[in-house]
Image: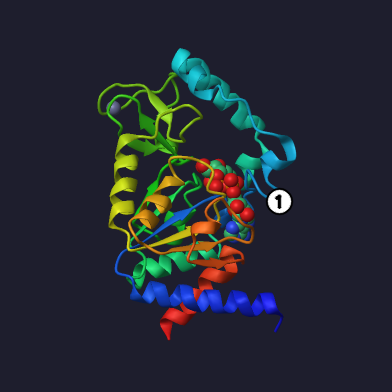
Amino acid sequence: MSESAATTESAIAEAAALLRASSHAVALTGAGLSAESGIPTYRGTGGVWTRFGEPTIDGWDLFCTDPGAWWREALDHSHAGSEFAESIDRAVPNAGHIAMAELERMGRLAHIITQNIDNLHEDAGSRAVTEIHGNRRRVRCMNCGTRDRLDLISLDRLPPTCPECGGILKNDTVMFGEPIPDDALRMCYRQAAAADLFLVVGTSAVVYPAASFPILARERGAPLIEINPEPTELSHIASIVVRASAGSALPDIVELLRR
Ligand code: NAD
Ligand code: ZN
C-alpha cells in the first residue's frame, strides 16, 4: 500500500471512531458531494467557475425589481437548458449521499446542513436536512415563507402567487445578495451549537454563513472531520482530514461502523 493510501485508510478509521463516540454529529455538505453524481462543482479542479469565470451578481436585484420579468426570463431559459441545469435534472444520489442517509438511520448523524440545491440528500433517504441555499425543485413565498413543489404550482400567470397568502413566489434557490431564509438559518445555528462532532464534506468552505457553522462548532470544542480530495479553508482546523472523494470515503466509514 502506498504511503498516501495508508494515511487515508487510517484517517477513515479515526473518522469512524469519532462518529461512534459522538452523540450529535452534524455535517456540512457542498457541491463536491454531488460531483460523483455528474453535477459539476463551481470551484476546484474542473469547476464551472474555474473554467468559465464567476457569474454576475444581479439575480436578486432583478427579481426584486420585476418578479414577473424574472420568471418569464427563467422559464424561457429553462427551455434552452444549460449544461449545469441539465446535469442536476439527470442526477441521482451517489454512494456518498447513500452512505450519509445510512449514517442517519444508524443514529450516527443527527443533521445535514447542505449548500446543495439538487435534492440528492432527500432522494437518498436523508430526513434531517437543512438546505441553506434552497432547493431547485421548490418555490418559496416571499411573504409567508411557505415552500411548495415547483412542478405543482400554476405558472399561467407570472409571477406565480402563494396559495396560502397570495404573496409572490420565488424559486427557492437563494440568489446572490438574497438573505438566507430565517427558518433555515436558525436551524443551522441550533445544529452548530448542538454538535459534538462536525463533518465537512465536499465544500471549499468559502461561502458564508455556511462555512461559519463548522467553525462555530470547532470553537465550542467539537472535533472536525474534513472529507475532500483537495485542501480547503478549513483544513488547518480539522482534527481529521480524509483526502479522498466522498463517494469512496463515506461508504468505507459506514462499513467500519457496521462491524
Ligand atoms: P465549491 O464548488 O466551492 O467546492 C467544491 C469542493 O468539493 C472543492 O473543495 C473540491 O475539492 C471538492 N470536491 C470535488 N470533488 C469531490 C468529491 N468527489 N468528494 C468530495 N469533495 C470533492 O462548492 P461549495 O463549497 O458547495 O460552494 C458552491 C456553492 O454553489 C454552494 O453554495 C452551492 O449552493 C452551489 N452549488 C450547488 C451544486 C449542487 O447543488 N450540486 C453544485 C454546484 C454549486
Ligand atoms: Zn405565502
| Image spot of residue 85 (x, y percent) | 61, 40
**Quadrant housing the N terminus:** bottom right
- Residue type at the position of mark 1: Thr
Looking at the rendered structure, the secondary structure element under dot 1 is loop
The quarter of the image holding the C terminus is bottom left
Residue that mark 1 sits on:
45
Find out if the beta carbon at label 1 lies less than 8 Å from the nearest ligand 1 atom: yes
Q: Is the residue 186 above or below the residue 20 in the image?
A: above
| The furthest residue to the right | 51
Is 51 above or below relative to 93? above
Instruction: Tell me where residue 91 appears, x and y as whole percent.
Output: 58, 53
Q: Residue at x 44, y 37 (%)?
A: 151
Q: Which of the 4 image quarters holds residue 100? A: bottom left
When asked about the image quadrant of residue 67, the answer is: top left
**Could you classify mark 1 by the number of other residues whose Cα lies within 10 Å: few (under 14), some (14-19), or many (20 or more)?**
few
Between residue 14 and residue 127, name the one nearer to us: 14
Colour approach in the figure: rainbow
Q: Residue furthest top?
A: 65
Q: Quadrant of residue 5?
A: bottom right
**In this rendering, does residue 24 appear at all?**
yes
Establish if 169 lies above or below 243: above
**Can see residue 91?**
no
Percent x, y of residue 99: 47, 68
Total numbered badges shown on the rendered structure: 1
- Residue 125, given in percent of the width and then of the height, sits at 41, 61
Q: Nearer the viewer, residue 209 or 162?
A: 209
- Residue under the image location 55 percent in, 26 percent down: 75
